[in-house]
Image (tube, rainbow, N blue to C red):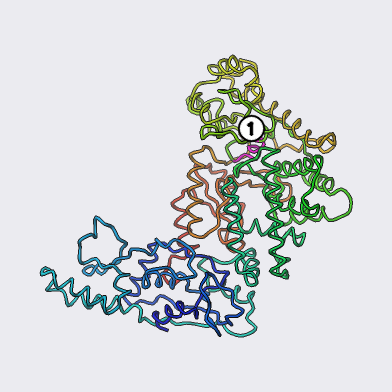
Amino acid sequence: MKISTILDHIDSGHVALPEFQRGYVWNRDQVRGLFDSLYRRHPVGGLLVWATESRTATHRGDGPLAAGVVKLLLDGQQRMTTLYGIVRGKPPKFFDGNAQTFSGLRFHLESQTFAFYQPLKMQGDPLWIDLTELMKNGTTGLGEFVARLNQNPALAPKVGDYIGRLSQVLGIVDVDLHVEEVTGAEKSLDVVVDIFNRVNSGGTKLSKGDLALAKICADWPEARDTMKQQLKRWEKSGYSFNLDWLLRSVNTVLTGEAKFSFLHGKSAEEIQDGLKRAIKRIDTCLNLIAGRLGLDHDRVLFGRFGIPVMVRYLDQRDGTLDARNRDKLLFWFVQAGMWGRFSGSTETYIDQDLAALEDDGDALDRLLDQLRLWHGGLRTEPGHFAGWSLGARFYPVLYLLTRMGEAKDWCTGLPLKAGLLGKMSRLEVHHIFPKAQLYKLKFKRPEVNALANFCFLTKETNLCIGEKLPEEYFPEVEAKHPGALASQWIPMDPRLWKAENYRDFLEARKALLAVVTNRLLAELLHGETRWLEESAPLAPPSATGVPGGIASEAEEEQLTALNDWIESHGLPRGVLAFDFADPTTGEQQAIFDLVWPNGIQEELSQPVTVLLNESAETLALASRGGFRCFASTEDFKAYVLKEILALEVGA
């Protein structure tokens, strides 16, 4: 079928995009490559379509489908979207992506190359042809370009060659593409998605969550957009969740199960009701976690897969909790995060916890008993604060202590509660002993970034302290705001404020942090402290804790930018500071900088991690754990473009 005919069918609604397809993810290199291949009449691959009745077809976008049989693109979306965007000068109705990717493509009549518009290079040069202007106007446009060329005497000797090249560009829309059809009444959505995954072996496939969402969209076309709007609302509040996570909560509300397969039999009305209830309960959870525990943004929201369990518990009780059960539920959430309950087999442990909610009796007691039996004890010891970096499992605990314990700022003396006003009042990590000073004294990175060397202060105070050593600025803080140091669990022995006693300072502060952790968590139990009577098992003592971790805010910014880049290509964000744990015991073994634990194509490709400036030990742990490791953002991007997004033009 000619490309021009396919584009006409897109306009008329005879060709569309199935709802389960992801958005447009090509980059400009791929756009140039496609047009270069078509210009030279090289093969670019055929199309695979699903021929189905329009009245039952669920498609993307607002455009209406034609009556009768329509063809939904299974393979070829990126190519046809690119062609439509350049030939028509606008994206197709099913478009979801960045239209700038195919805007401004030019063709050079002499070199016969394609490039995107660059004013300094192309402006005023008659040999650079606006491809969209030429394609939109067809033969009429060809006549106009020929007239312009004839007006330039310097080009006269080669006008004939240029006309031939312009005609060859226009002839791109007459290229025939082989179209293979999937037909038959027996081709259910499951079968078609399986075919889609097989033919997209080099590109982005669909996970179990995608398949569940595809089935939902078949009955409720607006489901994906509705859920995305909710995710954006939470993102504005500082929490980054994905569709799979939200769908997991919808699942627990409706079915009491973690596996997506339990959603398949639910009607559109049931899904809509489940989503409404799940959103309401998630809002309650986030408000409780932020308001009572102080965990008010994404970086400190550990154990996020405990929220679907909390959602189920709340929904069973119509969202009504007294103070005792509210705090006991929050105690369970914190403990699940502290010991990595969901760091291993997430779906398995969610199912176990959901099952504990279903029996008669006290569900919260069963949840806590189950957690203690699994981990072996819920009491915090000083050694649990031996971690380092922003990815340490107890990093959110330190933030929680700061918020719950009303730690005071060292410049103003004010309690560091949530909701401080002003851009300089956002809490930042402060190295009590400055990094620069410790590196001068030859301390290694894990010790410099030890968790016990962290506290949280406002940006203004952080800047004010600068690189002063504690022996210099601690006396000033204590004189100005008595008790402010102790409020941040600083050992008050001045000998420990000296750099030569830094390691002793760390040990003393870890002991203070353990005491306050147990005290504040005990308050959540309202006197029922039997779950805190046993200590959690400790790994062999280590001065540096587990290997790996994000060492600085600058490194975190680099990883966040990489996450933004991958999201811009229509792929899921990775997990920052991933807690690599023993799947059976939850014991933390390492911290990986940025991870896709189920692969970038969830459940369909190899787990991947980006490890910046990490030791050979950390890289070896990740490799033994089945992860494909990348030590630079450039290498990772090349992997994504080539192996995940399938840079080949025919993909």
Compared with 434, 302 (above or below) is below
How many discs mark residues in the rendered view? 1
Residue 449 location, quadrant: top right
Compared with 210, 495 (above or below) is above
Compared with 440, 355 (above or below) is below
Observer-nearest of 622 and 638: 638
Q: Residues within 10 Å of mark 1 (few under 14, many from 20)?
A: some
Q: Which residues are magenta?
A: 391-399
Observer-nearest of 233 and 600: 233
In the picture, measured across the screen, residue 116 lies left or right of residue 635, that is left
Residue at (43%, 76%) from the top-left corner? Answer: 45
Q: Give residue 386's position: percent from left, percent from top.
A: 65, 33
Q: Secondary structure at mark 1?
A: loop
Q: Is residue 242 magenta?
A: no
Residue 149 location, quadrant: bottom left
Query: Quadrant location of the N terminus?
Result: bottom left
Q: Is residue 393 magenta?
A: yes
Q: Give residue 493's position: percent from left, percent from top.
A: 64, 16
Observer-nearest of 450 and 224: 224
Q: Give residue 563's position: percent from left, percent from top.
A: 51, 51
Residue projecting furthest to the right = 361
Compared with 278, 438 (above or below) is above
In the picture, measured across the screen, residue 271 lies left or right of residue 597, that is right
Q: Give residue 132's position: percent from left, percent from top.
A: 32, 70
Q: Looking at numbered disc 1 in the image, what kind of residue is underneath it?
A: Lys
Pointer 1: what residue?
417
Observer-nearest of 627 and 204: 204
